[in-house]
Amino acid sequence: MAERNLDFDKIIDRRNTRCLKYDFAKRRGKPEDALPLWVADMDFETSSYIEDALIERAKHGIFGYSEVQTPYFEIIRSWMKSHHNWDIQERWLVKTPGVVFALAMAVRAYTKPNDSVLIQQPVYYPFSEVIKDNGRKVVSNDLYLGDDNRYHIDFEDFEQKIIKENIKLFILCSPHNPVGRVWTEDELVRLGDICVRHGVIVVSDEIHHDFVFYGRHFVFANLKKEFENISITCTSPSKTFNLAGLMISNIFIPNRELRHKFRRELDAVGISQLDVMGLVGCEAAYSKGEEWYNAMLSYVHENIRFIQEYVRENLKNVSMITPEGTYLVWLDFRKTGLNADELDNVIVNKARLWLDSGRIFGKCGEGFQRLNAACPRSILKEALDRLRDAL
């Protein structure tokens, strides 16, 4: 049976499907007619092989407590080896309902209340939320935008923050959301060496690892044995195959003591077995989704090129940080002269767009907006036309 869901220009009506992206604008303070390109899921049908696997499982009609056996792991191992040259071991695997959930569990497992946790803003805003909501302090080693229109790490500040704030936990975003950096091997090794030197545990959120357009994704834990020993690597098929609603993530913790502490937190919040559909979807994605994945990746890359050309030709005083990875585009509006409040007003009330305001990614994100490029190109063009007209 051939893959059926390869028409990424097809517009699928997601309204009235309990869809967070489309059905909750009013509740979240946005106009009901706002075009949403905010939350990081795709407007594409997933692979027909995943669809068929879920339908077949649903036909069984019994949805009792479910768990997976070794074949599940072997399927994941094959994907990680072929796509990321990473040899994983079954005992490392801990399954959770999502990566953000795993981040929260790591904060609870490896730090104490009032401890400081290091992140690199502007960064995915739940990083800050899971730190603050668990009574810890956010410390940021802010990334800086270089003359090459790429974000970079201030390594001296990174080490100084670790020492000054007595940091024991660092949450790495790789590839980085929202600035789109795919960190080089040298950058990751330099970060890792500093963390090893100061006894810092690294939670590496690598959920976007299958979206790389320039460069190569390096699994942080795979770069050195010392890094493996201090790493919690967070992965999921949810971004790659648009399965966020199935609530499945695969977390890899090679260090036995760190794994034990993490599992103890899972026990404390009452998590044991996960949703059977998430397990079925993950197996189908990694075993049969290759054709869909490659076609989707090519389409998204063309979308990013389309945005880049459109911004250059039509949006005066707006610039785009070209994403090396992820399907999220970071737009710089600072030269428009609009302050953060004015910019949000133009985006929401004039352009009638629902994007992610840069300010939620940290103070250094003010003046920016994050746009999701994983949608049919006609929707993307309508969004950009609205933005052009509003500006």
Image (spheres, helix red, strand yellow):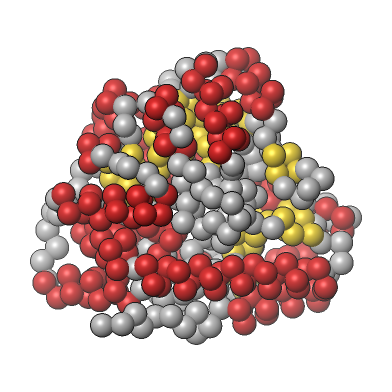
Q: Position of residue 223 (x, y in %)?
A: 46, 34
Q: Is residue 141 above or below residue 304?
A: above
**x 53%, y 83%: residue:** 9
Q: Could you tell me residue 150's position as x and y percent?
A: 72, 48
The residue depicted at 44 percent of the width and 29 percent of the height is 224
- Left or right: 68 with respect to 329? left
Q: Decide: is 372 above or below 172.
A: below
Name the residue nearer the viewer: 170 or 14: 170
Examine the rendered structure and indicate whether residue 171 appears above or below residue 169. Answer: below
Asked whether the viewer can see residue 363, the reply is: no
Write down the quadrant of residue 282 in the picture.
bottom left
Is residue 328 placed above or below 377 in the rendered structure?
Answer: above
The quadrant of the picture occupied by the N terminus is bottom left
Residue that appears at 22% across and 36% down: 91
Closer to the camera in the image, 164 or 8 = 8
Front one among 180 and 165: 180
Residue 225 can be seen in this image: yes
Relative horizontal placement of residue 296, taking residue 150 as reference (left or right): left
Left or right of residue 372, residue 11 in this image: left
| Percent x, y of residue 373 | 59, 67
Q: Residue at x 23, y 41 (%)?
A: 90
Position in image of residue 320 (x %, y %): 74, 59
Judge by depth and name the residue closer to the eye, 24 or 77: 77
**Residue 389 appears left or right of 271:** right
| Label total for image | 0
Quadrant in which the C terminus appears: bottom right
